[in-house]
Amino acid sequence: MRPERAPSMSIGELAAATDTKVVTVRYYEKVGLLPPPRRTPSNYRSYSGDDLARLRFIRRCRNLGFTLDQIRELLRLSSNTQHKCSEVDRITAAHLADIEDKIKDLQTLATKLRRIGARCKGGGRIANCRIIEALTS
């Protein structure tokens, strides 16, 4: 009886399974978020289920706006399941605070753009455009 081999997949299969571009997978390897993959005898990359789970984790983090450094730290922390999660809480709270600050900034920006847009009557000429005037002053 032969031992079962762990399922393996190519870089294209890994990318498709995670809705990630192949170039992004290579980039994550280059910056150390993904470990160097095993290689087939013909030197093709070969990925395991662990690689798939790790890339899914990275993708979820990116979709939530975490930086690569934050993801790197979350990956490091997640590798020790007995560790307290206070550091994960700290990273997440800091990220949430950044997002809330950005939301406030975007709301302020939207208010300013509405105000500028309300000054335009439309149909005029650029020489008399209130929006251009507001942007240049």
Image (cartoon, helix red, strand yellow):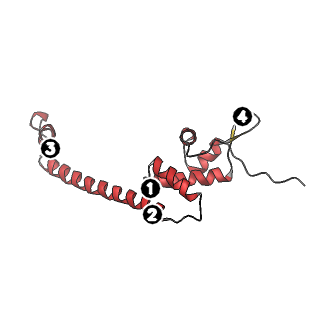
Q: CA distance from mark 3 to mark 2?
A: 50 Å
Of 14 and 74, nearer the camera is: 74
The disc labelled 1 sits on which kind of residue? Leu
Q: Where does residue 119 sit, x and y in percent of width and height?
A: 11, 47
Of 54 and 106, nearer the camera is: 54
The disc labelled 3 sits on which kind of residue? Gly
Q: Mark 4 sits on what residue?
A: 43
The disc labelled 2 sits on which kind of residue? Asp
Q: Mark 3 sits on what residue?
A: 122
Q: CA distance from mark 1 to mark 3?
A: 39 Å
Label 2 residue SS: helix
Q: CA distance from mark 1 to mark 4?
A: 34 Å
> Can you tell which of label 3 and label 2 is closer to the viewer?
2
Q: Earlier in the sequence, mark 3 or mark 2?
A: 2
Q: Mark 1 sits on what residue?
A: 64
Q: Residues within 10 Å of mark 3 (few under 14, many from 20)?
A: few
Q: Residues within 10 Å of mark 1 (few under 14, many from 20)?
A: few
Q: Quadrant of the N terminus?
A: bottom right
Q: Where does residue 30 sit, x and y in percent of width and height?
A: 56, 38
Disc 3 vs disc 4: Cβ atoms closer than 8 Å?
A: no
Q: Where does residue 15 sit, x and y in percent of width and height?
A: 59, 45
Q: Earlier in the sequence, mark 3 or mark 4?
A: 4
Q: Earlier in the sequence, mark 2 or mark 1?
A: 1
Q: Earlier in the sequence, mark 1 or mark 4?
A: 4
Label 1 residue SS: loop
> Can you tell which of label 1 and label 3 is closer to the viewer?
1
Q: Earlier in the sequence, mark 4 or mark 2?
A: 4
Q: CA distance from mark 4 to mark 2?
A: 41 Å
> Can you tell which of label 2 and label 1 is closer to the viewer?
2
